[in-house]
Image (spheres, rainbow, N blue to C red):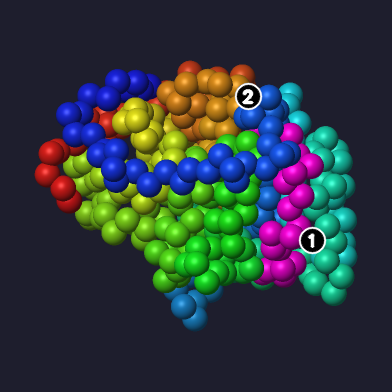
Amino acid sequence: MLISKENTFKKKIPEENISEEKIPEENIPEDHIPNHQRIGILSGGNWIIDRVKIVDAYPKRECLANILSESMHNGGAAYNLLTDLSLLGASFPLAGVGLVGDDEDGERILAQCAALRIDASGVRKAPGLRTSFTDVVSEKGSGKRTFFHSRGANAGLDAEHFDLGASRARIFHLGYLLLLDRLDQIEEDGRSRAYHLLMRAKALGFRTAVDMVSAEDDRFASTVAGTLPAVDILFLNEYEAERITGVTLRGQSVWREGAARWALESLLAKGVNEWAILHFPDGACALSAAGEWHCQGSVKVPVGSIAGTVGAGDAFAAGVLFGLHQDAGMGKCLIMGVSAAAACLTRPGSSDGIVAMPLCLELGRLFGFRDVSRIRDAYKEAQP
């Protein structure tokens, strides 16, 4: 278990490079509620049905693979995060916003929310649209997966569907950027519609958290980077970090010295207000705008116990936000995140392996954590 609470590096992020988006006092709305008076997590964005197929090996083009099993599960940032938080044992209010189709899959989503005590009053049925779904092909053994997605009702989700003023939640989580057609659109001011929605949330008193999808997309610079000044807590993996920052994190599968921190510094300089959090198979790193630096190894789940990696990133985010909502330090939050992700790995669906947080934490004590000291400590004065 490797946690560094101290900022052990001499190099700091110049304050003038941190473009925190301030809310002018005259623009604070009358329905503003200070964050310390708020409680709960509101998550909006993608609500997807995942149709998971476990195959013996991922085939080359025009070749065949054997389907070993098929199952249906929750999918999408909002659906996964709230489901995970409920299963982890969150005692604070959970609520969702999104669009589903007026179909069997939509009914399935709403029924599961009711069973998990998730307030789905903000999840509306979109007449004439199909509930979004993803065919997930997951390779047995490695857990590597490939996604074939039908955008469906999620494509219609827009700012008008979010009644933020009616919510007293402490954290507003939005995801996935690059998979929300209307919210990804760029306005005349050069900012995305998601940016304006998040700024509205900040003005009301929310802390904002954002996740994105690992798409082969050239909009990382325009859509994602342009949204960062409205983001307090950013979650992303190494592929997404490379696409936004241009910092190469790996060379021939080996982490470049200092690259993780360089990438997170770049994200903070581009506007992230509080925490930039990078997760990857070996663990996670987090850097605050004040220079607080943490690294945490992932749980060493035995290969034979890994059923798939679908939903692991969302499980990680759920664990971290669970901790942040309860005012835990970032070191503890990262442990909660990697422990929730470890539980997720044990079953093929996004949330099937999620159990109460104390049981997730027990996985780390049982299997141990990977050593990420090289990533934590390797930091040079020179820029990449």
Residue extending furthest toward the left: 382
Quadrant including the N terminus: top left
Q: Examine the rendered structure and indicate whether residue 42 appears above or below residue 325.
A: below
Q: Pointer 1: residues within 10 angstroms few (<14), some, or many (20+)? A: many
Residue occupying image coordinates x 58% and y 56% = 196
Labelled disc at residue 198: none
In this view, the residue in front, 24 or 248, is 24
Q: Amino acid at mark 1?
A: Val
Q: Is residue 102 magenta?
A: no
Q: Earlier in the sequence, mark 2 or mark 1?
A: 2
Tell me where residue 118 appears, x and y as whole percent.
79, 39
Return the residue nearer the eye: 131 or 193. Answer: 193
Q: Where does the image place residue 16, in percent across and percent down from the top left?
A: 29, 43
User: Is 63 situated above or below 243?
Assistant: below
* Magenta stretch, residue numbers: 151-170
Q: Count up the numbered dots.
A: 2
SS at mark 2?
helix
- Which residue, given by chain and number where applicable, does mark 2 sit on? 36
Q: Is residue 152 something one can see in this rendering?
A: yes
Residue 302 on image: x %, y %: 46, 34
Tell me the amino acid under the disc marked 2: His
* Residue designated by label 1: 100
**Circle 2 residues within 10 Å: few <14, some 14–19, many ≥20:** few
Give the alpha-carbon distance from disc 2 to disc 1, as whole Å: 32 Å
Q: Residue at x 57, y 33 (%)?
A: 321
Q: Are marks 2 and 1 in contact (CB under 8 Å)?
A: no
